[in-house]
Image: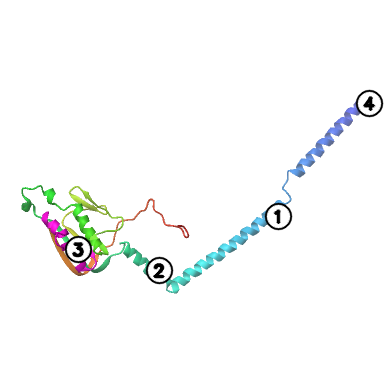
Amino acid sequence: MKKSMYVSLFITTLLLGLMIAFQFRSNTGGVPTDRPRELTQELAQLDEEYKELQAEAADLQKSLNQMQTGGKYETMQKELYKVRMAAGMEPITAPGIEILLDNQPPDDRTGFDPELFSISYEDILRVVNELRAAGAKAIAINDQRLVATSEIRSAGRFIDVNLTRLNSPYTIKAIGDPEKLESSLIIKNGMVDTLKEWGIAVTITKKEELTVPAYLNSLEFSYAKPLEEGEK
């Protein structure tokens, strides 16, 4: 009888301990009491940032409206046009000279290898360099506008300019002082004398008004990138 009483007391004590332990875990595993306060603070901060972004967007829209109505937009458009013209992205009309380079007829070159007396990419390149040194502001070869990325290279019987295959005769248009540009080519023992000695026909015409077309190919920069504001 005494033994059964001890067993009952032991079981009762064990159940009471388990209930106390379970109650303690339930209280400690719930949501921390300070979590709602943290979420409230985060929500207030996000709301403040949203209001700041709204104000910034309103300022930018106001600046854009002022630029469009206050003449700044037109000023920027003019500046953009100047930059595009300097880069060769716009056609240009001004005084200049037109140079026609042509191979002599094959009958006039009998007995010689015609390739030896044909216009080469180096001839074109020398003429272009002379024109640039004389102050040419814009140059085109068979209406291919030369820009910073243009190439003049041999392609067999042809000459490639801006990845476009050209054949003779070659017409080179140069914008600049016509007298100065012509003088740079016709000086004694200069470029024209040299070309004529090689059997190349050269005709130079001064123009009071000459149009050089715009560069029409695409420009892609694989490695170059603009500097960010404040970056050196």
Q: From the viewer's side, name the closer residue of 5 and 188.
A: 188
Task: Say whether disc 1 or disc 2 marks the residue closer to the N-terminus.
Answer: 1
| Residue 19 shown left or right of residue 57 in the figure | right
- What residue is rendered at 81% in x and 36% in y? 18
Compute the Cα span from label 2 to label 4.
Answer: 105 Å
Q: Please report the bounds of the magenta region as a residue range.
A: 173-200
Mark 1, Cα crowd under 10 Å, few <14 / some 14-19 / many 20+, is few
What label does residue 76 carry, if any?
2
The C terminus lies in quadrant: bottom left
Q: Quadrant of the N terminus?
A: top right
212 or 18, nearer to the observer? 212
- Report which residue position mark 3 lands on: 184
Q: Earlier in the sequence, mark 1 or mark 3?
A: 1
Q: Can you say whether 89 is above or below 4 in the image?
A: below
**Label 1 sits on residue:** 37
* Residue visible at 56% across and 62% down in the picture: 53
Image check: 68 left or right of 155?
A: right
Marks 4 and 3, how far apart in space?
131 Å
Percent position (x, y) of residue 219? 34, 55
Whole-number angstrom distance, CA of label 2 to CA of label 3 = 37 Å
Q: Nearer the viewer, mark 1 or mark 2?
A: 2
Mark pair 1, 2: CA separation: 51 Å
Disc 4: which residue: 2
Of badges 1 and 4, nearer the viewer stands 1
Neighbour class for label 3 at 10 Å: few (<14), some, many (≥20)? Answer: some
Q: Is residue 118 magenta?
A: no
Amino acid type shown at disc 3: Ser
The kind of secondary structure element at disc 3 is helix
| CA separation in Å, label 1 and label 4 | 57 Å
Residue 79: numbered disc: none
